[in-house]
Image (tube, helix red, strand yellow):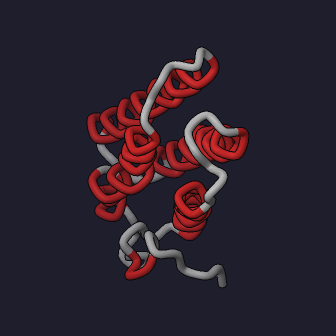
Amino acid sequence: MAQETQLTNLGLLRIGIPQIDEEHRELTDRFERLLADPDASYGSETFVTIVTQITASLRVHFNHEEAIMRSLPMPDEELSRHIKAHDAILVECFQLHEAMMLDVPMSQSEVVLMIERWLVNHVRTTDVKIRAYLPSKIK
């Protein structure tokens, strides 16, 4: 079993689907690596590499999550809202990469808060709603 991280302990980012929970853990592991690495200052090669890994993983994760949600008895409106939330995050990912490529000044804390919103807040406020549509034996 994968080691719990500070962000994933207490099961706060688990929704009850093993593949999705593992992807959430991997994403938060990368985020924690970004926070802990002294060489990961905004604009550094390390920072750009880790942020690129996070955003690439988010795209793949969202595809997996959306496929799973389509297989659940989730109402179309709920599914649509969730996908729109993913799309908004992906737009922000693109904007962040564009800003980094153009050397647009941003504070590291601004970027960290953005990524935290993508990873942690999205799971706690949006992904958690998936639980309501899981078969009772999984909940």
The reply to whether residue 60 is in sight is: no
Image quarter of the C terminus: bottom left
Q: In front: 110, or 52?
A: 110
In this rendering, the answer to whether 100 lies above or below 7 is above
In the displayed orientation, state which residue is furthest to the top.
102
Q: In front: 54, or 132?
A: 54
The reply to whether residue 4 is in sight is: yes
Q: Quadrant of residue 33?
A: bottom right
Horizontal side of 139 relative to 95 (left or right) equals left
Number of numbered markers: 0
Image quarter of the N terminus: bottom right
In this rendering, the answer to whether 90 lies above or below 29 is above
Q: Residue at x 52, y 51 (%)?
A: 68
Q: In front: 51, or 72?
A: 51
Q: Residue at x 72, y 39 (%)?
A: 45
Q: In front: 89, or 48?
A: 48
The percent coordinates of residue 8 (x first, y second) are 46, 72
The percent coordinates of residue 126 (x first, y second) are 31, 50
The percent coordinates of residue 108 (x first, y second) are 46, 41
Q: Residue at x 53, y 20 (%)?
A: 99
The percent coordinates of residue 72 (x first, y second) are 43, 53
In this rendering, the answer to whether 1 lies above or below 114 is below
Horizontal side of 105 relative to 57 (left or right) equals left
Q: Quadrant of residue 109?
A: top left
In this rendering, the answer to whether 85 lies above or below 124 is above
